[in-house]
Amino acid sequence: MHVVAIYNNKGGEGKSTVTVGIAEFLAANRNKKVLVVDLDAQASSSCALLGRQSLNAAIREGRTVVDLAAQLKQTRRPSIDPEQFLVWRAASEARGSALESMAMLVPDGDRMYDVESSMVWGKHNHLFRDWLKPKLTEFDFVLIDLPANVTKSAMVCVNGLAMSDFVLIPTRSTHISLNGLPRTFSLIDQVRNVNGDGFPTVLGFLLNATDKRNQQYRSIVRPMVAASTDGEIPPFFQNHWPASPALEAATDEDRDARTLKERFGNAYDHARKVARELEVACEKYERTQVQPIKLSLWQRLGLA
């Protein structure tokens, strides 16, 4: 089982769209059993994969990741069965690249703050890692959709990072996007330090809405790619997430897509290749000692 957080502390970088795309292709194209943990109060992934009606039903029934976190904080009992909190999306019966069944842990945005405000950094960081993660081994991939602007007080989200093996960072190739990377790495480093086991590790960057031919890419992103080639920062995925109306519409909760091609349109191959690259990167990862990125490097790259 691989647990991958899709995270960038800046908003608008495509985290939910990337999560949905990778989840759908791992399940339907790669025959993987997938769980999506939606920790974003906006519930974009949940609405895209389940629909608003199923999300609201889970909230009414107390079957959300927030309810699970509250129970784990109160009891820390290994007897808690996460299955009772999972919401399943049934497989499509369409021909061709039909959408496969998938499990979700959905958020309850209205109650997230109340639960998190009762949790303490350093004391409740590992509820998911210690009590939830061991119960999820039936899944091949657990994808965690994290929101933007996460701080140490956002303890449900901190728990999501703490249980992750890897982090994939989607980012656009603009100054305003890349300037958020130091804060993103700062929280990852803080969680890693408390974990004490070297995880989560950043698997790489995924460029979103990027045209490698334009001046912005050459002046902003190319120096970062050079730093990643030298091993100073994590690598960039070879494949990228293009600027595509089809990808933007892929998370539309009202879209009645039954196959991968219906959902992703002419961006099908891009999403498929990204999902496959993620799968290979997880399988081939060789554990190495991870060092925090120094402020001087961010400054040299013009990001601090």
Image (tube, rainbow, N blue to C red):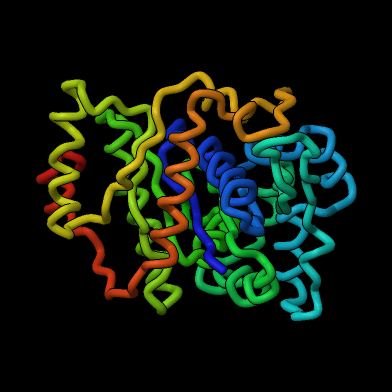
User: From the viewer's perspective, is residue 111 above or below residue 160?
Assistant: above
Foreground residue, 216 or 66? Answer: 216
x 54%, y 48%: residue: 146
Q: Residue furthest front?
A: 96
Left or right: residue 102 compared with residue 280: right
Q: x, y percentage for residue 191?
A: 43, 65
Residue drawn 65% across the image and 65% down it: 139
Picture quadrant where residue 51 is located: top right
In which quadrant of the rendered image does the C terminus lie? top left
Q: Which picture quadrant has residue 110?
A: top right
Q: Quadrant of the N terminus?
A: bottom right
The answer to whether any part of residue 116 appears in the image is no
Question: In this rendering, is residue 156 above or below 126?
Answer: above
> How many dots with numbers?
0
Q: Could you tell me residue 209's position as x and y percent?
A: 37, 27
**Nearer to the camera, 51 or 113:** 51
Q: Relative to 24, say whether 142 is above or below.
A: below
Residue 256 in view of the camera: yes
Q: Position of residue 50 (x, y in %)?
A: 75, 39
Q: Choose top left, top right, bottom left or bottom right for residue 177.
A: top left
Residue closer to the observer: 168 or 26 = 26
Query: Does 171 appear above or below 27?
Result: above
Provide residue 234's location: percent of width, then percent of height. Answer: 27, 56
Tell me what residue is drawn at x 77 percent, y 39 percent.
92
Residue beneath the point at 16% across and 22% down:
215
